[in-house]
Amino acid sequence: MQLKLKLTKMHCKSCELLIKEDMADLGVEAVADHKLNTVTLKFNEKDISLEKIKKKLEEIGYPEEWKV
């Protein structure tokens, strides 16, 4: 599945790298863009749920401002 989300708390390249690395730990491919405040996620729904991805993003500082 591919999903594009809007995350409003990204400020810099470090934010992009943090998201990319933490999503990779979950087996999720992430392409983040702090200028557009978006992250595109590619993942297999059989391997990980969207809820687990959301929980991880909240843990690393990107909560509730979700727009799918």
Image (cartoon, grey):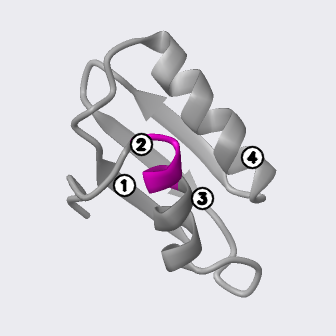
Residue drawn at 36 percent across, 54 percent down: 4
Q: State the CA–CA distance, disc 2 to disc 4.
A: 13 Å
Cβ–Cβ below 8 Å for labels 1 and 2? yes
- Residue at disc 2, secondary structure: strand
Secondary structure type for disc 3 = strand
The magenta segment is 57-61
Q: Nearer the viewer, residue 59 or 4?
A: 59
Amino acid type, residue under disc 1 in the picture: Lys
Q: Is residue 3 left or right of residue 9?
A: right
Disc 4 designates what residue?
24
Residue 40 % position (x, y): 45, 48
Cα–Cα gap, marks 1 and 3: 9 Å
Q: Cα distance, mark 1 to mark 2? A: 6 Å
Q: Secondary structure at mark 1?
A: strand
Q: Amino acid at mark 4?
A: Ala
| Of the pair 2 and 67, the residue shown nearer to us | 67
Q: Quadrant of the C terminus?
A: bottom left
- Mark 3 or 4: the one toward you: 4
Give the alpha-carbon distance from disc 3 to disc 4, as whole Å.
10 Å
**Residue, x 50% and y 25% (percent of image)?**
16
Image mark for residue 39: 2
User: Which element carries disc 4, helix, strand or loop?
Assistant: helix
Looking at the image, tell me whether mark 2 or mark 4 is earlier in sequence order: 4
Q: Earlier in the sequence, mark 1 or mark 3?
A: 1
Q: Can you say whether 38 is above or below 48 in the image?
A: above
Q: Which mark is residue 42?
A: 3
> In this figure, which residue is indicated by the disc labeled 1?
4
**Which badge, 4 or 1, comes first in the chain's sequence?**
1
Helix, strand or loop: magenta stretch = helix
Neighbour class for label 3 at 10 Å: few (<14), some, many (≥20)?
A: some
Q: If the image is split into quadrants, where does the N terminus sit? A: bottom right
